[in-house]
Amino acid sequence: MEKNRILSGIQPTGNLHLGNYLGAIKNFVSLQNKFDCLYMLADYHAITTDYNQAEIKNHIFETTAAFLASGLDNEKNIIFRQSRVSAHLELAWILNCVARLGWLNRMTQFKEKAGENKEKASIGLYTYPVLMTADILIYGATHVPVGEDQKQHLELCRDIAQKFNNDFKVKDFFKLPEPIIPTNVSRIMSLRDGTKKMSKSDPSDSSRINLKDSNDQITQKIRKAKTDNEPIKLNILDENSKRFEAKNLISIYASLQDKNVKEIIKEYDGKTFSIFKNKLIDVMIDKISPISNKIKEIQKDKAFIEKILDTSERKANKIANDNLVKIKNTIGLI
């Protein structure tokens, strides 16, 4: 019996951080024994906004190294560069002709990234969700791990797939992919401002834990992380609570320990954050330090990384091109 298939990916923009690990990579590792998995280095998506053309290749190698260092098995999974599988773009054009302008106009992530002057945003940023749909459908993925910021894109993917099936009278030709939403994983926020997402673009390096940070850097960043003077209490979780930074640190600890936030609050109820931070530092170093060391080790051998990517890309191309022939046949181009 065939396993269900997963397609997911990360933009290789360099400087991967704790949010990338807890929000995506850690979940990838847990899924690899249950699913047939393809994990994509989404370099075409990376160029929809400003990027460093001199550095993108190094960022691809770094992201691949992070995948491997975190526990992804390149023998079990297909780890590949999106730009090395041209079928993604061919299917994206076909799906551009299926998707509707009104659907894309509702995409909130475009509005957020484009800012106030949408006229200056690129067409690529606007049609990003259609390419994401092609990424998923070209492999016949049945499931997609998603965070809160990608749920709307997956709903669009399902709408486009359903419309294709209806337009060409091919019931169930494209599977409607189901979301996989990780449990016990909260959105990881900045260590300096609990209302903002942890981001590699934040000018303050103290706002994030990078996966390549040393033990000393992790220690200093957690010690300086913004909190408040109140002890840990269950009311941190109240909807009207303004203790954003306190909740963020507890959420990070819970995610690293694979526990529920309420369990952690019960464990540390009444204790100060000075005590809690010491425990968080110990847990974080225990989890992140081995990954950091391994990333640095793997990155030294670029030939090894290239070989893994080349091998996976041959497999990805075989699956994608076989499916593209079927798609072209369905719409009358073959």
Image: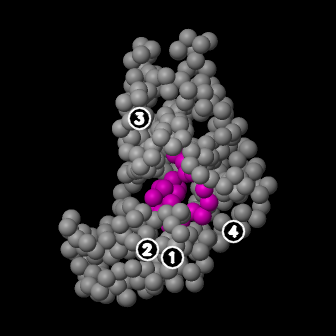
Q: Residues within 10 Å of mark 1 (few under 14, many from 20)?
A: some
**Of the residues shown, which amino acid type is indicated by label 3?**
Leu
Look at the numbered discs 4 and 3 and tell me whether their residues touch, using CB distance below 8 Å.
no
**Of the residues shown, which amino acid type is indicated by label 4?**
Lys
Look at the numbered discs 1 and 2 and tell me whether their residues touch, using CB distance below 8 Å.
yes
Tell me which label, 1 or 2, sits earlier in the chain.
2
Residue 303 in sight from this viewpoint: yes
Residue occupied by mark 3: 104
Residue occupied by mark 2: 191
Foreground mark, 4 or 3, reads 3
Tell me which label, 3 or 1, sits earlier in the chain.
3
Q: Residues within 10 Å of mark 2 (few under 14, many from 20)?
A: many
Q: Residue at x 77, y 61 (%)?
A: 301
Question: Coloring scheme of the render?
Answer: one colour
Residue 266 at x, y percent in the picture: 26, 77
User: What is the C-alpha distance between the residues marked 1 and 4?
Assistant: 21 Å
**Of the residues shown, which amino acid type is indicated by label 2?**
Leu
Tell me which label, 4 or 2, sits earlier in the chain.
2
Q: Residue at x 66, y 40 (%)?
A: 83
**Of the residues shown, which amino acid type is indicated by label 1?**
Ser
Residue 255 in sight from this viewpoint: no
Q: Which mark is residue 296?
A: 4
User: What is the C-alpha distance between the residues marked 1 and 2?
Assistant: 7 Å
Foreground mark, 4 or 2, reads 2
